[in-house]
Image (cartoon, rainbow, N blue to C red):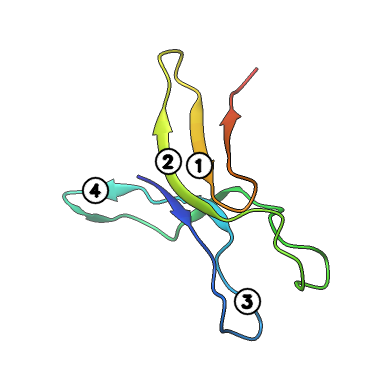
């Protein structure tokens, strides 16, 4: 399962602001989440360049990530 983690607004340090992959086996998480898409926060974590709010796939299999900071949809595709 791909999960868009919208990000915290009241934590220090901030958490979330990324997309992770959670693998399941028999209906339960099989291992720790794997980061898939990050870089939504500035290096000092003061500026949010994006906040993932939803994920989906397009007809070609690319991951689509809705971002409510930039009011955009980001498309992530392999080679």
The crowd level at tag 2 (other Cα within 10 Å; few <14, some 14-19, many 20+) is some
The C terminus, quarter of image: top right
The crowd level at tag 4 (other Cα within 10 Å; few <14, some 14-19, many 20+) is few
Q: Which residue is mark 4?
A: 25
Residue most toward the right?
43
The N terminus, quarter of image: top left
Q: Residue at x 64, y 53 (%)?
A: 50
Q: Residue at x 49, y 32 (%)?
A: 64
Q: Which residue is mark 3?
A: 14
The crowd level at tag 3 (other Cα within 10 Å; few <14, some 14-19, many 20+) is some
Give how far across and how far down residue 13 sits, in percent: 66, 82
Distance of mark 4 from mark 2, alpha carbons? 21 Å
Give how far across and how far down residue 65 sits, in percent: 51, 39
* Image: 76 above or below 32: above
Q: Which residue is mark 2?
A: 55
Most foreground residue, 29 or 12: 12
Q: N-terminal of the two: label 3 or label 1? A: 3
Q: Is residue 6 left or right of residue 72?
A: left
Nearest to the eye among marks 4 and 3: give it: 3
């Amino acid at each position: 399962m791909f999960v868009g983690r919208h990000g915290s607004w009241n934590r220090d340090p901030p958490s979330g602001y990324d997309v992770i992959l959670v693998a399941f086996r028999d209906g339960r998480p099989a291992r720790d989440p794997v980061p898939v898409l990050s870089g939504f926060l500035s290096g000092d974590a003061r500026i949010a360049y994006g906040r993932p709010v939803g994920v989906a796939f397009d007809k070609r299999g690319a991951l689509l990530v809705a971002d409510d900071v930039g009011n955009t949809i980001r498309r992530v595709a392999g080679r």
